[in-house]
Image (tube, helix red, strand yellow):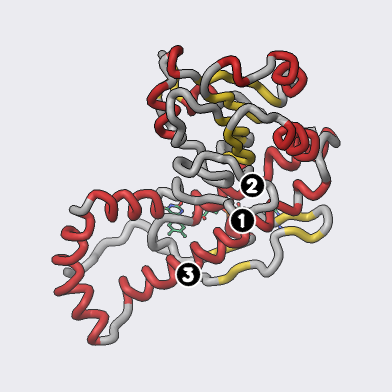
């Protein structure tokens, strides 16, 4: 193919660099300033936006002085690992797409066109590929903010995972938790939750409590969260949509400690 008559041309310099620290005292790095790489895979802008979302609510809480100052350290703990992973992924994808080595060229021209459609034809593999490229599969399970109590449900999303979506009556989990602030989902039979204890957890404008029960059309959401319709569990969802705390049963003591430390 021959290209001709360009309307506009520019030099584009490819970078492959990552910051060693995302925080130094009161300064934070986000976006391309923290990780810059080849555009292959279309990851840069999305990674930068997720950095900003992760940092934004933590800065807001720090400015209000409502939470443990260690909340700001969790930004680097959660996002630096994601930045390093994106650098590795884009570097490999760029090498595969542009290498002139005969073996790579053969694989790109002859093997990939046959193998990629076959792999993407398998639903679980397609789902994994989608969750990776869309960055919806990013999770912070090893973060200091992620807490799974020993009695937490064995199935479903864990602390650090992004809250999945599912219908709840005439709304959905994501719509229910869309307003700014933390959201506490009390799941299962109503008697499990003592009203006084629940009222003491509410923080107007900062923490909203919701009940999700099978009787109110929350069956699909309970299943998605790994709960049987008659068992109780609770999920504290962070302002960025990730689960911070998860427990089974109706014991609110662990949750109370978590809330007073991280929500304030
Ligand atoms: C060809 C190409 C294609 C891409 N395609 C995709 C894609 O499909 N999907 C995707 O997710 N990402 C893509 N990206 C990556 C994406 O564009 C970047 O990751 C994103 O723009 C980074 O945003 P940022 O705000 O972190 O940095 P930038 O967009 O670089 O913004 C930084 C800003 O700071 C300004 N600035 C710098 N120094 C100073 C200073 N001293 N004082 C004041 N201002 C300053 C700069 O002028 C700039 O406006 C692509 C990138 C390229 C190059």
**How far across and how far down the image is residue 21, in percent?**
71, 65
Disc 2 element: loop
Query: Mark 2 highlights which residue?
Result: 146
User: Visible in this render: residue 233?
Assistant: yes
Residue at image position (22%, 73%) is 108
Q: Quadrant of the C terminus?
A: top right
Against 232, residue 90 (above or below) is: below
- Confirm if mark 1 falls within 8 A of ligand 1: no
Query: Mark 3 highlights which residue?
Result: 88
Q: Does residue 51 appear to the left or right of 125 in the view shown? A: right
Confirm or deny contact between disc 2 and disc 1 (CB under 8 A): yes
**Mark 2 or mark 3: which comes first in sequence?**
3
Which mark is on residue 249? none
Against 248, residue 2 (above or below) is: below
Crowding near the residue tagged with mark 2, few <14, some 14–19, many ≥20 C-alpha atoms within 10 Å: many
Residue at image position (38%, 59%) is 41
Confirm or deny contact between disc 2 and disc 3 (CB under 8 A): no
Q: Does residue 146 appear to the left or right of 90 in the view shown? A: right
Which mark is on residue 142? 1
Q: Does residue 230 appear to the left or right of 32 in the view shown? A: left
Real-space Cα separation, disc 2 to disc 1, in angstroms = 7 Å
Real-space Cα separation, disc 2 to disc 3, in angstroms = 25 Å
**How far across and how far down the image is residue 262, in percent?**
75, 39
Query: Viewer-nearest of labels 2 and 3?
Result: 2
Task: Locate residue 256: give its quadrant.
Answer: top right
Against 152, residue 181 (above or below) is: above
Q: Residue furthest right?
A: 65
**Mark 3 or mark 1: which comes first in sequence?**
3
- Confirm if mark 2 falls within 8 A of ligand 1: no
Crowding near the residue tagged with mark 3, few <14, some 14–19, many ≥20 C-alpha atoms within 10 Å: some
């Amino acid at each position: 193919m021959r290209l001709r008559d360009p309307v506009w041309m520019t030099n584009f310099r490819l970078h492959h660099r990552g910051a060693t620290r995302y925080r130094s005292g009161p300064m934070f790095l986000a976006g391309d300033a923290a990780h810059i790489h080849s555009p292959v895979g279309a990851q840069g802008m999305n990674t930068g936006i997720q950095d900003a979302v992760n940092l934004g609510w933590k800065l807001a809480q720090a400015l209000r002085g409502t939470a443990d100052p260690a909340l700001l350290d969790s930004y680097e703990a959660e996002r630096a690992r994601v930045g390093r992973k994106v650098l590795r992924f884009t570097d490999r994808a760029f090498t595969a797409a542009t290498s002139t080595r005969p073996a790579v060229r053969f694989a790109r021209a002859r093997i990939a066109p046959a193998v990629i459609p076959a792999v993407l034809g398998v639903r679980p593999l397609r789902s994994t590929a989608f969750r990776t490229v869309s960055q919806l599969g990013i999770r912070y399970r090893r973060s200091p903010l992620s807490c799974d109590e020993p009695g937490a449900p064995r199935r479903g999303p864990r602390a650090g995972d992004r809250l999945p979506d599912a219908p709840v009556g005439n709304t959905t989990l994501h719509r229910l938790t869309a307003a700014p602030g933390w959201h506490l989902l009390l799941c299962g039979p109503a008697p499990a939750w003592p009203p006084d204890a629940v009222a003491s957890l509410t923080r107007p404008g900062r923490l909203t409590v919701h009940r999700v029960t099978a009787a109110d059309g929350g069956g699909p959401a309970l299943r998605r969260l790994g709960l049987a319709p008659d068992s109780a569990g609770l999920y504290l969802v962070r302002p960025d949509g990730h689960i911070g705390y998860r427990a089974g049963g109706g014991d609110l003591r662990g949750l109370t400690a978590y809330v007073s430390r991280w929500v304030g």
